[in-house]
Image (spheres, rainbow, N blue to C red):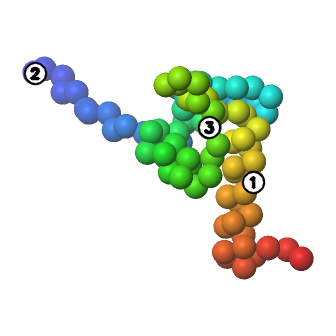
Amino acid sequence: MPATKTKEQPSTQWKTTGQIEPDRLYSLEEFKRVTGLKDWALRQARRAGLKMLKLGNRKFVKGQAFIVFLENQNETQETDNGSECS
């Protein structure tokens, strides 16, 4: 009797492969790989205020810009939830 193969389910966890360094400039592909963000999430982040640099048809993200973006998102969520400390 042949062995049956079980189909592996893709992981739904957010996988990251590195850390963001503030003084580093990341190409868009490298940034996606390091953060684990996919195209849709990156578009949403850009619409929400993540600053990108463009040279020709290539886009880049500064590490510091991403850190500032995350901090701003966190502050917005805290204010929206009414949990901001005074």
Residue located 18% across and 27% down the image: 4
Q: Around disc 2, counting alpha carbons within 10 Å, would you say few (fewer than 14), some (14 to 19), or many (20 or more)?
A: few
The earlier-in-sequence mark between 2 and 1 is 2
Residue bearing the label numbered 1: 71
Which quadrant is the N terminus positioned in? top left
Label 1 sits on what residue type?
Answer: Glu
Measured Cα–Cα span from mark 2 to mark 1:
57 Å
**Which of the two labelled residues, at mark 3 and mark 1, occupies the earlier sequence position?**
3
Q: Measured from the top left, where is residue 42 in percent x and y?
A: 51, 43
How many neighbours does mark 1 have within 10 angstroms: few (below 14), some (14-19), or many (20 or more)?
few
Q: Residues within 10 Å of mark 3 (few under 14, many from 20)?
A: some
Q: Nearer the viewer, mark 3 or mark 2?
A: 3
Given residues 4 and 10, the one toward you in this image is 10
The numbered mark, 3 or 2, whose residue comes first in the sequence reads 2
Locate residue 19: give its quadrant: top right
Identify the secondary structure beneath mark 2. Answer: loop
Q: Which mark is residue 1?
A: 2
Position of residue 13 relative to residue 56, above or below, is below
Q: Looking at this view, is 53 or 45 the one in front?
A: 53
Q: Position of residue 50 (x, y in %)?
A: 63, 46
The quarter of the displayed image where residue 61 is located: top right
Q: Secondary structure at mark 3?
A: loop
Q: Secondary structure at mark 1?
A: helix
Q: Quadrant of residue 33?
A: top right
**Residue 70: x and y, percent?**
69, 50
In the rendered image, the residue lying farthest to the front is 56
Q: Residue at x 89, y 76 (%)?
A: 86
Q: Nearer the viewer, mark 2 or mark 1?
A: 1
List the single residue furthest toward the bottom.
Answer: 82
For mark 3, what is the residue? Answer: 52
